Image (spheres, coloured by chain):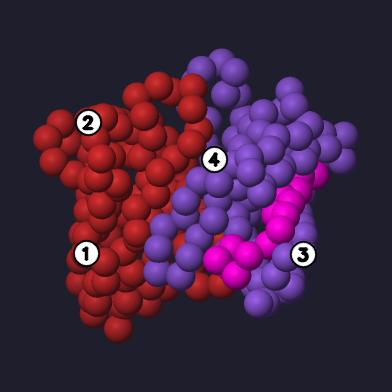
Chain colours: A red, B purple
């Protein structure tokens, strides 16, 4: 059973470009979560999605950031017009269909560097 | 507002000894607590959890203790091994009994180094 997959593992963008981060949850998982880890900080919740629905986006910056989890394909975290402060590790996690568990399985992360 | 706090950014322990990692929380609605372990360049992996109806949960070398009145939990690793060297995140969520979703809030992590 493959784990949570994220790609790319490393992404370099110049200021003003767009960054697209992909996450494929574990097989059978329909709940996806995105977190951001800034240097020397902990994991900060960004958004929780189920298939085709955003359930909780309270951790997402109001501008430039968006997320989707289409019926087919991976979840996408999109950052428009990136700035240096967006440089961080972005982790995706997934959990089983049952909403009663809070054990989340994490991917290896995408390390975004904005030049 | 840091609702889950890990006040020790780092900890060094000799191999074979006990490692004790601490975590404090402020939200009295939290009722489910988890510890995750993270190696460099990898995602966090789930280690052990505890529900608020318990005060202790044990899994092999790992034991988590919960003191609800003090809003404090700790992770004990006995005996510590060099392979335990990693960053450990404490996490908490609220409202799991209802079967509904509640956001998981993470602490800032404690970097454990086990010295051979």
Residue tagged 3: B17
Find the magenta span and give its range.
B72-85
Which quarter of the image is occupied by the N terminus of chain A? Answer: top left
* Front of the two marks 2 and 1: 1
Location of residue B51 (image quadrant):
top right
Sooner in the amino-acid sequence: mark 2 or mark 1: 1
Labelled pair 3, 4 in contact (Cβ < 8 Å): no
* Front of the two marks 3 and 2: 3
Residue B25 visible in image:
no
Q: Does the segment drawn in magenta span residue B23?
A: no
Residue tagged 4: B104
Residue at image location 48% in from the left, 36% down from the top? A103
Task: Determine whether the residue tagged by mark 3 lies in a helix, strand or loop.
Answer: loop
Residue at image location 73% in from the left, 65% down from the top? B16
Name the chain letter of the residue that bears numbered label 3.
B
Report crowding for label 1: few under 14, some 14 to 19, many 20 or more residues within 10 A (C-alpha).
some
Report crowding for label 2: few under 14, some 14 to 19, many 20 or more residues within 10 A (C-alpha).
few
Name the chain letter of the residue that bears numbered label 1.
A
Viewer-proximal residue among A80 and B52: B52
Q: Is residue B66 left or right of A78 when viewed as pictured?
A: right
Cα distance between the residues tagged 3 and 2: 49 Å
Cα distance between the residues tagged 2 and 1: 22 Å
Same subunit: marks 3 and 1? no
Residue A63 location, x and y as percent? Answer: 35, 55
Residue tagged 2: A52
Residue tagged 1: A8
Cα distance between the residues tagged 2 and 4: 21 Å
């Amino acid at each position: 059973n493959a784990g949570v997959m994220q790609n790319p593992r490393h992404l370099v963008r110049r200021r003003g470009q767009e960054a697209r981060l992909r996450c494929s949850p574990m097989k059978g998982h329909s709940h996806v979560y995105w977190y951001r880890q800034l240097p020397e900080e902990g994991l900060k919740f960004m958004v929780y999605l189920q298939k085709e629905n955003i359930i909780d986006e309270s951790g997402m910056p109001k501008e430039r950031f968006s997320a989707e989890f289409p019926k087919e394909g991976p979840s996408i975290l999109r950052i428009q017009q990136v700035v240096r402060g967006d440089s961080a590790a972005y982790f995706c996690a997934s959990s089983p269909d049952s909403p009663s568990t809070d054990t989340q399985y994490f991917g290896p992360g995408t390390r975004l560097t904005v030049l | 507002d840091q609702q889950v706090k890990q006040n020790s950014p780092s900890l060094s322990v000799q191999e074979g000894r006990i490692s004790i990692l601490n975590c404090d929380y402020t939200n009295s609605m939290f009722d489910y607590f988890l510890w995750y372990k993270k190696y460099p360049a990898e995602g966090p992996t789930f280690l052990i959890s505890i529900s608020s109806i318990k005060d202790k949960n044990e899994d092999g070398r790992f034991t988590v203790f919960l003191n609800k009145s003090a809003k404090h939990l700790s992770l004990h690793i006995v005996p510590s091994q060099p392979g335990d060297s990693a960053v450990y995140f404490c996490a908490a969520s609220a409202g799991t009994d209802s079967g509904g979703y509640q956001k998981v809030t993470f602490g800032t992590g404690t970097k454990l180094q086990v010295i051979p």
